[in-house]
Image (cartoon, helix red, strand yellow):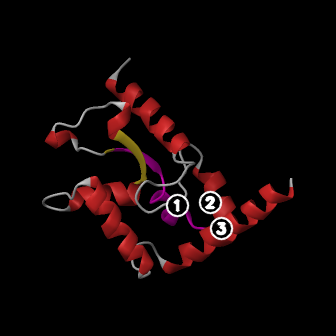
Amino acid sequence: MTSGNRLKKLRKQAAQRQGGYCFYCRYPMWDSRPEEFIGRYGISSGLAQRFQCTAEHVQARCDGGKDVAPNIVAACRFCNSTRHKAKHAADAQTYVSFVRSRLAKGKWHPPQLRASFSERKNASDRSSRAR
């Protein structure tokens, strides 16, 4: 199996383990069909791009991290790329704390997304309970 195929498989497994939510921000992600995601949440294609599912190395490759299941989590494109834009990327647990503190202040993702995702999640939860 090529490295790219292995990473794709690990990403899909991680996303499934995480219920389709980003490891860092806990917002929903899409993997292969952005149109479905856009329709479900009523957001623009530009905003949807930030929630594309990516494979995130808990221990970064540059620090010796490997493409193995225990080292791969699923993260939205925004969280993954933002973590690695820093001159010295924070370790995964520090970054989780940072992202969630920003979210609590309404300063990570655009505010309108919180409402879109919360409304859809609440409707989905109600539907699941009714079955």
| Residue type, mark 3 in image | Gly
Residue 101 locus on image (x, y percent): 36, 74
The residue segment tinted magenta is 42-56
In the image, is 62 to the left or to the right of 129?
left
Circle 2: element type: helix
Q: Can you tell which quarter of the image residue 37 is in?
A: bottom right
Return the x and y of residue 82 as percentages of the image width and height.
Answer: 30, 61
Q: Kindly check if marks 2 and 1 are in contact, taking CB atoms under 8 A apart as contact.
A: yes
Q: Label 1: which residue?
A: 48
Instruction: Confirm whether the magenta stretch covers residue 12.
Output: no
Would you identify the image quadrant in which residue 66 lies?
top left
Query: How many angstroms separate mark 2 from mark 1 (CA)?
Result: 6 Å
- Going by the numbered disc 2, the residue's amino acid type is Ile
Q: Which mark is residue 38?
A: 2
Label 2 neighbour load within 10 Å: few <14, some 14-19, many 20+: some
Q: Which residue in the structure is indicated by mark 3?
A: 42
Q: Are marks 1 and 3 in contact (CB under 8 Å)?
A: no
* Rendered view: 101 above or below 25: below
SS of the residue under disc 1 = helix
Q: Can the viewer see residue 34 in this picture?
A: yes
